Amino acid sequence: CWDKRELTDLAIISAIGIDRTNDSNYVLHLQIINPGNVAGGLQGGGAGDRPPVSVYSIEGNNITEALRKASMKVSRRLYFAHTNLVVINEKLAKEEGLDFVLDNLDRDTEFRTTATFVVAHKTKAENIVKILTPIDKIPSNKVNKTLDFTEAQYGRVVKINIQDVLKTLAANTMAPVIPGYMMIGDDKKGVSMENTQATDPKAILQADGLAVFDKAGYLKYWLEDDESVGAVWLMNKIQHTFINADWGKTKDAVSLQVTHQDTKLVPKMRNGRPYIHVKVSVEGIIDAVKYPFQLSDPKVLAAIEKALNKELEKEISHTVKKIKKNKIDFIGFGDTIYRKYPEQWEKMKDTWDKEYLPELPIDVKAETYIRRTGLRNNPIKHQFKDD
Amino acid sequence: MEKARISIRQLFVMIIIFELGSSLLITPGSMAGRDAWIAVLLGCAIGLFLFYLYQGIYQCYPNSSPKEYMDDMLGTKLSWLFSFLYILYFAYIAARVLRDFGEMLLTFAYHDTPIIIVNALLMVVSIYAVRKGIEVLARAAELLFGAMYLLGAIGLVLIIVSGTIDPHNLKPVLANGISPVLHSVFTQTMYVPFGEVVLFVMIFPNLNDRKDVKKMGMIAMAISGLIVALTVAINISVLDVDLTLRSQFPLLSTIQTIKVEEFLDRLDVFFMLALIIGGFFKVSLYLYATVVGTSTLFKEKNPSQLAYPMGLGILILSITIATNFSEHLNEGLNVVPLYIHLPFQLLFPLFLFIVAVWKKKRREKSKGEEAKK
């Protein structure tokens, strides 16, 4: 048989990191699973002191060359069907864009384009692939799960896979965003098993911000923390997050935990010029209050809803301003116009980012509904004597 | 392969499997871009008309083989020539379908395996089935139809559950007007897969009941048209139009996006199974048509013996028709529809249909006159 593969001859690759050397060679970091050391777990015992993955770094003029060269270092045949993470160097993404790496990965039949894509932020891709992580043994799983849960719980990042990026780049009405990942701590200590044997790991991996690319696939700027949440709202990808609103003099007097939301971008035409109406409807539960609200009174809730609306509109408008200033339409305002007004879009599409986007009127309307207030109605009153 | 008898239900499932065979593999109506699904539906409408022609000819001559009624209509010499051309046509399309599936397997799984091995394995099964005769093939179709149907239903549910379908990708509908869609209908979808049903003129004489052919055949065509259009629409809403058109095998790319709760994913092999079932039937039915056609043309007493040489010929043809996959696809898109499908699927059957109806009328008339006398 020509295409037979034995399980014992496969090196199962869980993550790929792509860096570049100074003399513009690519370096591939392949995170390979050591099956024996992963399974160890509770009963194995002996496996505990050896790392669950090994990372090999190979240099080459292009990805294909580096992969073939890898056979000199790895004793088995590289197997990509289970790769679920691709990390690309920040500098590489800025200078060379994504095309070269995406085409290779997309064309390959073994590699799955459902793998998550992240940009190494303020660090090399190497570190994201090499650091050992304590709770999830395989670092690529840790990165994936963190992104999943952060997207679901906090709403500051989105999980993006290679196919999403390909689709966006191809659509030409949108630009891609890719979540960033950083390493905090000591990269020398992070690569040994010691890192997983302390309660306070010396190096940890952390999701961090969103990298915004232009339509050609070059990294342009980063959206960090509070700026990114507005973007995630606009992308309609928020599942749970919180909204804080001030009340009188009290800062962050009330926190709403978002349970459901739906954000709609509604394109309209006024005198032949496009404008976008953003409609956000949010449902949530009161999570915490710092002010003696009579939460059992529906009128008070209605007033709080208003305050929350204002806060959310402010948050989103802030991001909108930034998007307009940077002239990159990664939310897909242009896309909604294309879907609804394809003929008018034909005229706008070439100059959309440069001319239309900075001038595009976007109004944001939020509607919050407080459904429940948790297990208690009114807060403890005596805390707030000064008010 | 003597006096085989197949039921109308078997015909029904065979038409559906045959229509789905390779149209699930490629993108029918790719020229229409985002509106490919509309092109498929319109193509299906024309396909219904074509099917009406084919079964109309058969209804005029219910007890004779295609060669026999062509003798009656055109005279033996012309009829011999056309029969011969039809045999070449069926053999060529069989080779094309075989190549399609061989390329799919090579691209997806067996990079290092020579294509002749993969194609030969597929062909061996088809030869075996054809040697056993159309009855066996029809019964196998009934059996495997269930399997294919089940796989399709599971696939649909899993794709929906994975949440990768974004119907927004289907908008804007008809952004460039109706003309690219019509262009695609008349150059792509009406021939492949719908016009290909012309093959069934070779099957009709084996039917044990000709009453419901029109009704059931048309229902089968309409159902397969809907399934193909649905598949195309799902492909586009999952992959978006660009990726669908750049994919060699869009359905498999769509299947790859299935991911249900971190444990149900990488199911493409599972669905390759469904595609191979369709491919097997398509190749087998074409091979059957070739074999039967040749045996009546050359008055061979034992047609099943012809399955070997014909199968081998088709196998060799499937390897030699193109040097690479792009060339193969290019021929399929630009040359075959206009120069091969159009005459064999539309022009010639239409001509025969008119002649057949005219002759039938005259026959009835003369019968009526005789009765008067």
Image: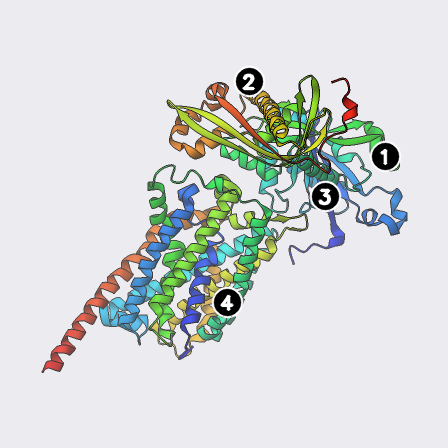
Please name the residue that numbered disc 1 is placed on.
A195
Residue extending farthest to the right is: A46
Q: Chain of mark 4?
A: B
| Marks 4/1 same chain | no
| Marks 1/2 same chain | yes
Q: Are marks 1 and 3 in contact (CB under 8 Å)?
A: no
- Closer-to-camera residue (B128/B369): B369
Q: Name above or below for residue A248 compared with residue A264.
A: above
Side (left or right) of A205 relative to A176: right
Q: What residue type is disc 2 on?
A: Lys
Question: Residue A325, labelled with which disc?
Answer: 2
Q: Earlier in the sequence, mark 1 or mark 2?
A: 1
Task: Residue A275: name its quadrant.
Answer: top left
- Closer-to-camera residue (B72/A249): A249
Which of discs 3 and 2 lies nearer the camera? The answer is 2
Mark 1 to mark 3: distance in Å?
A: 22 Å
Mark 4 to mark 1: distance in Å?
A: 60 Å
Q: Position of residue B285 (x, y in %)?
A: 44, 66
- Closer-to-camera residue (A24/A341): A341
